[in-house]
Image (tube, rainbow, N blue to C red):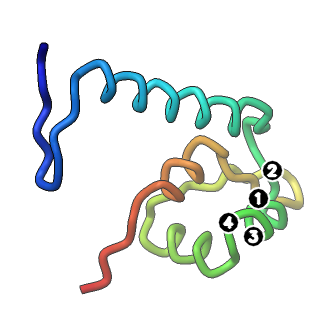
Amino acid sequence: MTMIQFSDKMVTYETFMNDLSARIVAQIKSTQNDPEYVSQKQAYRIFGRANVERWRRQDKVHPRRRPGKLEYSMVELRKLQSVSQDYY
């Protein structure tokens, strides 16, 4: 039996893989109905205006310009949302 040791506990490989696959399935289900692009207004509502503006200022997200509006890629926004911030 293969064991994986983390700093706070040991788990079997099978348990680790089951937990990992369950998290992946949950993430896919939560994002499967996402549109490819959302308007700036929708991005502000979903992710918070301050977050979207900070990501744009830091050049981490690149809006697509269309006549009269800006659109953001949901893939880019979701990726940035999942990054934990370290402010120290």
At label 2, the amino acid type is Arg
Q: Secondary structure at mark 4?
A: helix
Q: In screen coordinates, is 73 left or right of 8?
A: right
Which of marks 1 and 3 precedes in the sequence?
3
Q: Are marks 3 and 4 in contact (CB under 8 Å)?
A: yes
Residue 47 - label: 4
- Depth-wise, is mark 1 or mark 4 nearer the camera? 4
Q: In screen coordinates, is 27 left or right of 35?
A: left
Q: Which residue is label 1 attached to?
A: 70
Q: Residues within 10 Å of mark 3 (few under 14, many from 20)?
A: some
Q: Secondary structure at mark 2?
A: strand
- Depth-wise, is mark 2 or mark 3 nearer the camera? 3
Q: Compute the Cα span from label 3 to label 1.
A: 12 Å
Q: Which residue is label 2 attached to?
A: 66
- Depth-wise, is mark 3 or mark 1 nearer the camera? 3
Q: In screen coordinates, is 54 left or right of 42?
A: left
Horizontal and vertical percent position of residue 31? 69, 37
Q: Compute the Cα span from label 1 to label 4.
A: 15 Å
Which residue of the protein is positioned furthest toward the top in this rendering? 1
At label 1, the amino acid type is Leu
Q: Residue at x 16, y 55 (%)?
A: 8
Q: Compute the Cα span from label 2 to label 3.
A: 17 Å
